[in-house]
Amino acid sequence: MSVIVAENLTKRFGAFTAVDAISFSVSEGEIFGFLGANGAGKTTAMRMLCGLSRPTSGRGIVAGFDAALQPELVKASIGYMSQKFSLYEDLKVWENIRLYAGIYGVSASSIPTVIDQTLERLGFGTERNALVGSLPLGWKQKLAFAVAMVHKPRIVFLDEPTGGVDPVARRQFWEMIYEAADAGVTIFVTTHYMDEAEYCHRVSIMVDGRVEALDQPRELKRLHSVPSMQEVFFQLARRARRKEA
Amino acid sequence: MNQLYAFVLKEFRHIARDRWTTIILLCLPVVMLVLFGFAISTEVKNTPLAVVDQSKDELSRQLVERLASNQYFRLVKNLDSVEEAEELFKSGKASLVLVVGPGFRKELIAYGTAPVQLLADASDPNTARTVVSYATAVISSFQQQALGGGSVPYRITPVVKLLYNPTMKGAYNFVPGTLGLILMLICAMMTSVSIAREKELGTMEVLLVSPVRPLTMIIAKVIPYFVLSVVDFVLICLISVFVLDVPISGSLFWLVIVSLTYICLALALGILISSMVSSQLVALLISGMAMIVPVMFLSGMMFPIDTMPVVFQWLSKILPASWYISAVRKLMIMGLGFEAIRSDLAVLAGMTLLLALVAMKKHKARLDG
């Protein structure tokens, strides 16, 4: 069953077409890698799917709702983690969890349980009262992912979630992603790391606002007769005419 | 409700954790009132006075006596000649010199008028003006008494009477001004900076993707600063009544109403500013430059609006603080009621509504980028 569908999704800013009639669908429990160079239109496409930006034409259907017409319903059904670190550094670990639990409508009576469970799952028992600002970046990102999952969404959008962290922390982060996917959560993830693209079930590669390739990493490598996703990406990205934004 | 509560809780935690800002926000009104009320006061007390009495008759001695016994003057020296006065001015030992010409009594009896000269150190023109007007008032009241029933029956003596603030206490002027400034500072500046911070740090994006409605977010942002403003308002009123001896002589009820309106207005302004900028620094500069400075100089807090060039008078008309300060003056100092501040309140309410509408529209527009 498809939980994310893009049908000729297009966004124009004046004469500039940021996203040019892209179409794809993501099925439940899939880890979908959404790749592209800076300025290829990834972020704009993702904003449209999350109900933040209205498409010029085409449709985005997320969790069964039209992202342009029912953005509130879409927003309530998804989790989101941004490339910019998105927790409050001056709040404690548990206070951040408490905030997002409240925002995503977790009932007041079950909030304490949710906080305890989240801390336990992360192994953050002793960091409960630590200010988030004092945690190492890798930990913060794990926390941010857990917070994005606090209302048990069926779909999570991750916008470059592992930017700037070391390989070990990235590895741990991907273990969390796999765990969520195994539990049936659909993961829509953008990344700059091509080794991470290998971890995805399927990847799409955007060039100049269009989806130039979409398949399993294995198939893409075979199609382009190269040993790694890195090479696939280079071959496609070389065709780009746009300057980097 | 749950959402709003979680959000308000978060805002209060931000403020509580930013301990220094909170301390500053709570201490600022105290410091400002004390500074304005005592230190940079425009009232003049104990002006050093020197006298050149060239008649040395009974009446002239009475006149000098009258001036010297007044609390605003302090007789420092009796001089023999006007030339000596200059030395005294230069050394700063006197700010006012009274020169009584020869034959003072004789002329006064004969013609009903006798010239006296006042020399004032006008290097500080405001003080000089005040000092001279005090002295003139004292002299003319003396003159009336000295003439008794009056040998000249139809003389007209201008008598200056200072209403509402008879002693021309500086604090009377600065309490309304400080209120206008502090409330604007906390509401507009803190709100705009706090929203701009979320944009700068990227947390705003996460909030936008969340099901929180923008209105909920804005209300939650505004509540803590509203509370803080009310605390400061109460603090300022207490200090003004119990420390500065400035009474609230008018309607306390309307003072609260007009202040709450002004707080809402400042909050709306803060939201509007934050919708236009995306960094804390710009938010700070705009609210600082565009608000604090004009409030200080154009709202009538420091300089009277009536004596400004016309352009500035117009400018002061579009400053919410001018209307607020004017209303507070009427309520606190002049002891008037609702009738007197009706137009001030109406203008403030209108401005609040307009700003809130524009701010909401701006925030909506930004969401669909």
Image: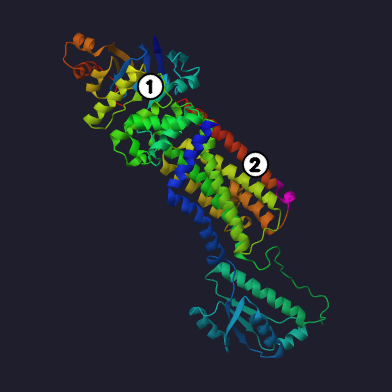
**As drawn, B252 above or below B131:** above
Q: How many numbered markers are drawn?
A: 2
User: Dot 2 lies on which element?
Assistant: helix
**Please, which chain is the residue tagged with disc 2 on?**
B
**Please, which chain is the residue tagged with disc 1 on?**
A
Crowd tier of the residue under label 1, counting other residues whose Cα lies within 10 Å: few below 14, some 14–19, many 20 or above: many
- Viewer-closest of B108 and B354: B354
Crowd tier of the residue under label 2, counting other residues whose Cα lies within 10 Å: few below 14, some 14–19, many 20 or above: some
Q: Is residue B300 visible?
A: no
Residue stretch in magenta: B337-342
Query: Which numbered dot is residue B242?
Result: none
**Residue B243 position within the rendered picture, expressed as x and y whole percent measured from the top left:** 59, 64
Q: Amino acid at mark 2?
A: Ala
Nearest to viewer (mark 2 / mark 1): 1
Could you tell me which quadrant the C terminus of chain B lies in?
top left
Q: Amino acid at mark 1?
A: Val
**Residue B68 position within the rendered picture, expressed as x and y whole percent measured from the top left:** 63, 82
Quote the CA–CA distance across marks 2 and 1.
Answer: 45 Å
**As drawn, B140 above or below A245:** below
What residue does disc 2 label?
B349
Occupied quadrant, residue B357: top right
Query: Which numbered dot is residue A156?
Result: 1
**Residue A210 position within the rendered picture, expressed as x and y whole percent measured from the top left:** 33, 14
User: Dot 1 lies on which element?
Assistant: strand
The reply to whether the magenta stretch includes residue B340 is: yes
